[in-house]
Amino acid sequence: MPRRIAVTGANAGIGLRSAVLLSSQGHRVLALCRDLGRARRAFAELPEEQRARIESVELDLASSASIHRAAAQIVDAGPLDALINNAAVFDQAVRTARSSAEGHELFWATNHLGPVELTARLSPALAAASEPRVVFVASKGLVTMPRLAIRFDELDNPSWFTPTRAYYHAKLAQVMTAVTLAERVGDRVEVSCLRVPAVRLDPARLAAQPRLLRALYAPKNRLAAAPEQIARVYARLVLDAPRHARGAGVYVDERLKQVPLPRFARDPAHRERLWDVTQAAMGDPTWAWGVS
């Protein structure tokens, strides 16, 4: 049965491959992207019948106003079967912290606050679906940072910023949020968080990096997983049997096998504090399942 599935960051990388794969299987895909022109160009070469199943929706995850507009458009159109929170920023060339319109550090806004707010704003459409799925995305790189903790008292403080610290800080928060949401919604929503391994960069994105970074990244890029491979994992998370039927937990690897939570994420008090801080930063949106 065809499903209606939203994918953020759907104009490049894993998001693009996911949109192409899911639409090729007959599903209706909402391709959420900051640049609609770029999104449409990304799908321009697809067969017309497949392209007709992809709807590009403008979304900037660093902007609460943009999230409101995109979510209203999607909710008004009816039930949403799945949301894949794929989009993230990780630009190694960014050396100093930047802020969103709401005053949040940009990596934190885009990679954590934005996906959680989008999920909350889309919750009425997800609640209207028969078997809703929500996928958050983390990174296998977290295993190399066992001491990483959420900086509750300096979330938007630019003094500790580096692109690597900011990226993995937000990814840790995504793991914790996925676990908390899964606990709060129970069987009403299938919530997963995928621990993505290193993924090969698209040639255009690699070429846009400074020369030194290109040289440093080249060996890793050759050994990294193909984005098409991870797109197939996304598809399984939103289309296959529910998590409890697979015997897996919320946090899974690319084989859909349960993996241990990062150390800091294991503490329920840390997870609850993050949930409360995130809710406040988003303006306390109302969740369809009463999980605020």
Image: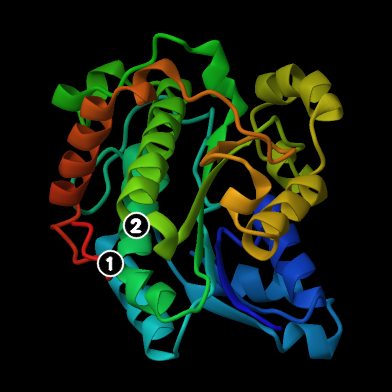
138 lies left or right of 241:
left
Residue labelled with disc 1: 289
Is residue 160 positioned above or below 48 on the image? above
> At 30% across and 22% down in the image, what residue appears?
267
Answer yes or no: do the residues labelled 1 and 2 have beta carbons within 8 Å? yes
The residue at the far top in this view is: 147
255 vs 243, nearest the viewer = 243
Q: Mark 2 highlights which residue?
A: 185
Question: What amino acid is at disc 1?
Answer: Trp
Q: Sequence order check: which comes first, mark 1 or mark 2?
A: 2
Q: Position of residue 36 (x, y in %)?
A: 55, 74
Instruction: Inspect this view and state whether residue 45 appears.
Output: yes
Please state which amino acid type lies under the numbered disc 2.
Val
Viewed as shown, does residue 135 lie left or right of 154? right
Decide: few, some or many residues near mark 1? Use Cα within 10 Å; few <14, some 14-19, many ≥20.
some
Helix, strand or loop at disc 1?
loop
Position of the N terminus by quadrant: bottom right
